[in-house]
Amino acid sequence: MTSSSSTDTNGSKNYFVNFNQDSTSLAVGGKFGYKLFSLGSVEHLEQIYSNANGDSRIVERLFSSSLVAMVSLAAPRKLKVCHFKKGSEICNYSYSNTILAVKLNRARVVVCLEESLYIHNIRDMKVLHTIRDTPPNPKGLCALSSNSENCYLGYPGSSSVGEVQIFDAMNLNAKIMIHAHDSPLAALAFSPNGLKIATASEKGTVIRVFSVTDGTKLFEFRRGVKRCVSISCLSFSMCGQFLACSSNTETVHIFKLEEPRDSPKKSAEESSWMNYFSTYLPTQVTDVFTQGRAFATAYLPIGGVKNVISIVYIKDGLRLLVATEDGVFYIYNFDSNEGGDLQLYKTYQLDDCGSDQADAAPKATDSDKPIAGLLGSYAGIVKGNPSGQMSGTESEKLREMAQATEAPPPDGFHLTDDQEYPPLTQNSDLD
């Protein structure tokens, strides 16, 4: 899911909010530290962890595991990878510039700077590849497929037009450049299987979906006709059938990804009309008639606030989730058959949720102490041309971490064991 980062100004509430890859949890960060909430119920927003030690500007959790990657306000160039259940730091890396975004899947960690991207192997945090001299990307716009089998990375290929560079983060090579829009990109999102990518431009009126394999345009949707709309988030549903879009307005649009129904009579009529339009009207006008419209719409109580969105099944129903950077979480009921205007079901104030729960990280037990003594031994400075080489021999703990990044088996294992992400025993010195 696409994340939203913010800073505190004039005492206003500005939080980092972000869903994990399958929207089973919500991360909230700020000057208070960070919190993780479970999204297994619509009746109760359960806080599963809170860390009040320091501040947070980026928080990324790997699915439902105990692995969290975070960047603090105080040290914006340093990435920390932590095991939040143990309250321990696995490793940290320092970069040459401010970290603007961090993306995770079970194979890779991608760190985005304004003019470069670093790709790490998540199993040992070795730097596998560096994409240098990317077009200026001050917002840190990038997307990483959550599906590690189709492990694609998308980022702007230009700062003047809406080109998307698709990079194969598994095989470490550029795959395809897609010319998505005439205006610079504003949002990107991969489908759950990683084979489609949705795009929006700074103009904010049209959303397009492309095939990652060959760059073919699969769908085109019209969000609206208003100018100066800033799209903040695109998000595919976990089932892959819907695409949601939010902006700086109070409206969230949901589009249905379906092929037009087969109807020879209707197709003939449409063909006749489109031939007429194509003959007498400009291309920009005829395009409007061929673009899909929103299948469903949700109206937020207030507009102008950046947010992140997700469509997931919770319990027995499909829900639209909206988390805003002013600390409000909305749950809407979504009828996948009827669409239309969505009903607001629940509203939560994120700074009030879980206030009665412990704010400190779990203390290390006696069995943890030998491992805890290794903390800080695995750290690197990423600069120049990092070789990614690490000294030391691979340990049993490293093998456990490698196994934990594998996809959970069908029996429902969710990577929640305390030993799934123990600190590494390697030393790293990257030049």
Image (cartoon, helix red, strand yellow):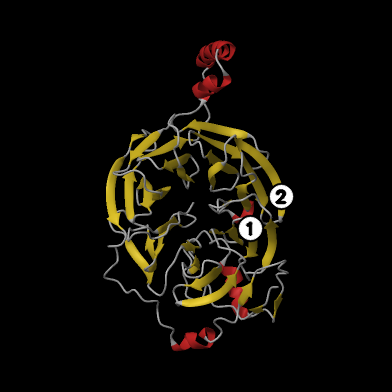
Q: State the CA–CA distance, disc 1 to disc 2.
A: 13 Å
Task: Examine the image and state in which quarter residue 283 appears.
Answer: top right
Identify the residue at horizontal 65%, vertical 39% (top origin). Answer: 178
Q: Quadrant of the C terminus?
A: bottom right
**Front residue of this view, candidates 81 and 48:** 81
**Front residue of this view, candidates 344 and 65:** 344
Comes first in the chain, label 1 or label 2 = 1
Pair 1/2: label in front: 1
Residue count near mark 2 (Cα–Cα under 10 Å), binned few <14, some 14–19, many ≥20:
some
Identify the residue at horizontal 73%, vertical 69% (top origin). Answer: 387
Q: Which mark is residue 174?
A: 2
Q: Position of residue 212 (x, y in %)?
A: 63, 42
**Front residue of this view, candidates 22 and 14:** 14
Q: Mark 1–mark 2 contact, CB under 8 Å? A: no
Q: Position of residue 298 (x, y in %)?
A: 34, 39
Dot 1 amino acid type: Leu
**Front residue of this view, candidates 176 and 203:** 203
The relative height of residue 1 versus residue 389 in the rendered view (above or below) is above
Q: Position of residue 246 (x, y in %)?
A: 42, 42
Residue count near mark 1 (Cα–Cα under 10 Å), binned few <14, some 14–19, many ≥20:
many
Q: Secondary structure at mark 2?
A: strand
Q: Position of residue 244 (x, y in %)?
A: 44, 41
Q: Disc 1 designates what residue?
A: 117
Identify the residue at horizontal 62%, vertical 66% (top origin). Answer: 96
